[in-house]
Amino acid sequence: MTASHQATQFGRSIQAPSEAWLAKQPPEPILEPDLPIIDTHHHFWDRATDRPGHRYLLDELLADLNTGHNIVATVFLECRSMYRADGRAEMRPVGETEFVNGIAAMSASGAYGSIRVAAGIVGYADLTLGDRVEPVLDAHIRAGGGRFRGVRHSAGWDASDAIGNSRPDMRPHLYERADFRAGLARLAALGLSFDAWLYHPQLADVVSLARAVPGASIIMGHVGGVLGYGPYAGKADEVFASWKRSMTELTVCPNVVVKLGGMMRRLAAFDYGAVAAPPPSEELAGYWRPYMETCIELFGANRCTFESNFPVEKVGTGYASLWNAFKRIAAGASADEKRALFSGTARRVYRLGDA
């Protein structure tokens, strides 16, 4: 890690973590080690071509999961990994579900321990296909072997080139499009959930979407996509106030829950490229507490769930310290609220049964 990583680059790319730098994080005792956790957001990939050396598959995930916390199951989130090389363009993302279901089957064998890795799989389908998305969803369901739970179709867009949009061709207000909403309605009719992802200035689009398709189960990722770099740097109070207004409006949509996590790069609360060692969990909790506590207060524990967003967050912290930070943030919650935040809400919204 070097000081060359500037705050304006935090959201532009995903770097491979530095294991040597992560090893300098102060060791900590595991807080509440028996508390069951379902990690609701992680990825698998092998970026041999575009990010040499950035491999995160079952062995790498298990090395993180087995660092002291009581992880009982996980949910995989799409990351454009292992798409099919040929066939119709809309069907190629099914390859990712096939790939992850294979890893999930390895985990389910018990040969790798008791954690149910990828007990839920969230893939990608182009919801702007409208009604024509149904064959794609059916293919994902078949490929998922009973584990396919829903779709994430990201909509992150900002006018600033510093931010980095979800896709190079992204345009504003994707979630406002009639064809997208028709696709979401088809997704909901199949009993599948929708993971939303965009930036905090766009949250009104999620409110509108949730109202337009009230039968859809919507999971708002990464605390609503708070931005703290580029044109948002140095405006923490203004950003927080704007974000809180939008999240307060979102609470009136009963079909929405919120994931607590995924703030390492976008919030840019500290420059992980310039510090000698990763901060301890107490410091991490301090950065994220205002947002995560506000979500818990607004939505309630039964509509919030923690997520690791690994290996993306690994650029700035280790897995054990990450979950210690979350436990510090939830320290004032009751036992029932902690069960909801760390596993109960996840089990319900991703329909994980006894995972």
Image (cartoon, grey):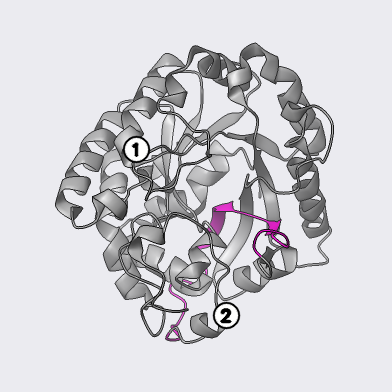
Residue shown at 18% from the left, 53% from the top: 235
Proximity of marks 2 and 1: CB atoms separated by less than 8 Å: no
The residue pinned by badge 2 equals: 19
171 is higher (above) or lower (below) than 10: above
Counting residues from the start of the chain, the first of labels 2 and 1 encountered is 2
Residue depicted at x 63% and y 55% = 73
Q: Could you tell me if residue 331 is visible in this image?
A: no
Which residue: 84% across, 30% down? Answer: 87
Res. 168 in view: yes
Region in magenta: 26-51
Q: Is residue 42 magenta?
A: yes
- Membership of 250 in magenta stretch: no
* Amino acid residing under circle 2: Glu
Vertical placement of 86 versus 342: above or below?
A: above
Q: Where is residue 145 shown, x and y percent of the image? A: 81, 39
Q: What residue would you read off at disc 1?
A: 159
Q: Is residue 351 above or below residue 308?
A: above
Identify which residue, 272 or 293, lies in the foreground: 272
From the viewer's perspective, is 288 left or right of 277? Answer: left
| Secondary structure of residue under mark 1 | loop
Q: Position of residue 79 (x, y in %)?
A: 62, 47
Q: As drawn, is 127 to the left or to the right of 103?
A: left
